[in-house]
Amino acid sequence: MVPIRVVRAIVAGMACVALALGGAEATAAAPSVATAGCGSPLSAREVGTIAALSDTSTLAGTVMQRLEEVIERHHRITEILADHRDRRGLFLVGLDLAEQRAVMPLQRDPAAFAHPDYAHAVSLELARRLLVNFHGEFAGGMVEPHWAQYFSLAADCGVSGARVAMAGYNAHLTVDLTYSVAAANARPQDAGDHFKLVDSIARVGTPIIDRTKSAYGVDIGPLWRFYFLGEGLDLLVGQGVATGPMLEAADDGYNVIVFGNGLALQNPALHDTTVGEIRALHDTAETAFDVLARLGGL
């Protein structure tokens, strides 16, 4: 079981990452796919490469073979975007490091998990969902609202890079991870493996902060510590944010809530209510980041 201090860290942090789910049309308003990231323009070849790499219909093989392939595709997309300082890569540079240093070493270790089939399946689904949305962005397809928010923020050059990056972590870990838990048919006995995966990401926080600063000149440190350690939660008191879902997450443990919501999504009687709870947690976190940005916390 994960130490409660670590659990609460992940909790309070993630409870403050968000996506205003109403921004689905934002990507359509972007000037062009090549220039929408506020960096140097991507070439047509690079846009095509990202579109091809993010096409999940070309994945094949066993679960582990597909997982290895998806993670390699994440890495290649990250390199292209970071080379241009395209802000759509602000989340990816940290994710790529976490996948290479934390997630995949565990996945390749046959003794790492009590239930390796679950661990492989949930990581593959989580990674796949990201590709699907990047494919929508770069190939002109559908983008889910929480990722449309990320791309919209990335395209607004007046929004801080830290704010953009954390919207990506929120989309990935608040929304996509929950649905991935459900898609992997998680059972209560998979909780330990779930916590182990999430905690592995938290433990490479400093290298993620350093890599983001090196690649983009963006310091996500304050937001990262807020996200994973709850530092600065007091700044939200009196701002109409640190209530409801956020405080519940801080009390119960964020990764506990995500895993629990993933289980609940599999129950038809709880599904619709749970969808609303996921949206509420996500929106509350997004609002928290907007408030912190206004207060100078980002």
Image: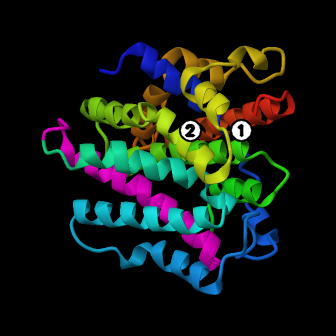
Residue 286's disc is 1
Type of secondary structure dominating the magenta stretch: helix
Query: Which of the two marks, 2 or 1, is nearer to us in this view?
Result: 2
Tell me where residue 294 sits by quadrant.
top right
Residue topped by disc 2: 209
Is residue 136 shown left or right of residue 124? right
Q: Which of marks 2 and 1 is nearer the N terminus?
A: 2
- In this view, the residue in front, 243 or 200, is 200
x and y percent of residue 191 in the render? 31, 31
Q: Determine the residue positioned at 23% across, 71% down.
A: 61
The amino acid sitting under disc 1 is: Glu
The amino acid sitting under disc 2 is: Ile
- In this view, the residue in front, 179 or 102, is 102
Q: Give the range drawn in magenta.
A: 111-140
x and y percent of residue 99 in the render? 39, 49
- Asked whether the residues under the numbered discs 2 and 1 touch, taking CB atoms below 8 Å apart as contact, a structural biologist would say no
x and y percent of residue 149 in the render? 71, 54
Q: Determine the residue positioned at 84% across, 21% down.
A: 239
- The extreme front residue here reads 214
Asked if 150 appears above or below 19 in the picture, the reply is below
